[in-house]
Image (cartoon, rainbow, N blue to C red):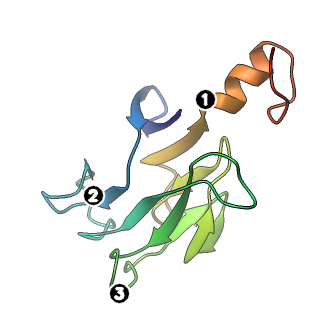
Amino acid sequence: MYSLRLVVTPDGASTLPLRETCTIGRHSLCRIKIVEEFISRWHCALIAMPPDIECDRPYFIIKDGELLGKPSANGTWVNSDRIRLIKLKHQDIITFSQFSAYPRLEFLDNYVSLGAEIGTDSHERVS
């Protein structure tokens, strides 16, 4: 339902499925390990949330820093805004420093992508 497009250079990218909470950082236990000097050991976490009143399907929020601890040293940026905790939307761009465009992640909501491909609003049901 969701995926992350990891862009490491202007010409190098890979897509990873996203089904559960995911940690990102330099630490060997992070699900997505990115070894760059400016990335913290536990830089951020994408947290899977269950459906609720506002959203009738699971969704993801992103939290800067350790899951239950301190923030990252250089911050987490979504669409050029420094964040602490926000709900992710289709095609949000996640970066790990104010000064570096790479590596970066693009959050993809495949449900929205599918709706766009078949010409429907992402919130309409297709019969």
Residue sitting at the far left: 28
Q: CA distance from mark 3 to mark 1?
A: 31 Å
Q: Which mark is residue 36?
A: 2
Instruction: Give the residue type at disc 3.
Output: Lys
At 49% from the left and 32% from the top, the residue drawn is 10
Q: Left or right of 48: which side holds 55?
A: right
Q: Can I make out residue 98 in this image? A: no
Q: Left or right of 86: which side holds 19?
A: left
Q: Bin the neighbour count of mark 3 within 10 Å (Cα to Cα): few under 14, some 14-19, many 20 and up.
A: few
The image quarter containing residue 24 is bottom left
Q: Which mark is residue 70?
A: 3
At 82% from the left and 36% from the top, the residue drawn is 123
Please tell me whether mark 1 or mark 2 is closer to you in this view.
1
At 66% from the left and 41% from the top, the residue drawn is 91
Q: Earlier in the sequence, mark 1 or mark 2?
A: 2
Q: Is residue 8 above or below residue 63?
A: above
Q: Earlier in the sequence, mark 3 or mark 1?
A: 3
Q: CA distance from mark 1 to mark 2?
A: 29 Å
Per the image, label 2 sits on a secondary structure element best described as loop
Instruction: Give the residue type at disc 1.
Output: Asn
Q: How far from the left and from the top, in percent, is residue 47? A: 45, 60
Per the image, label 3 sits on a secondary structure element best described as loop
Instruction: Give the residue type at disc 2.
Output: Glu
Please tell me whether mark 3 or mark 2 is closer to you in this view.
3
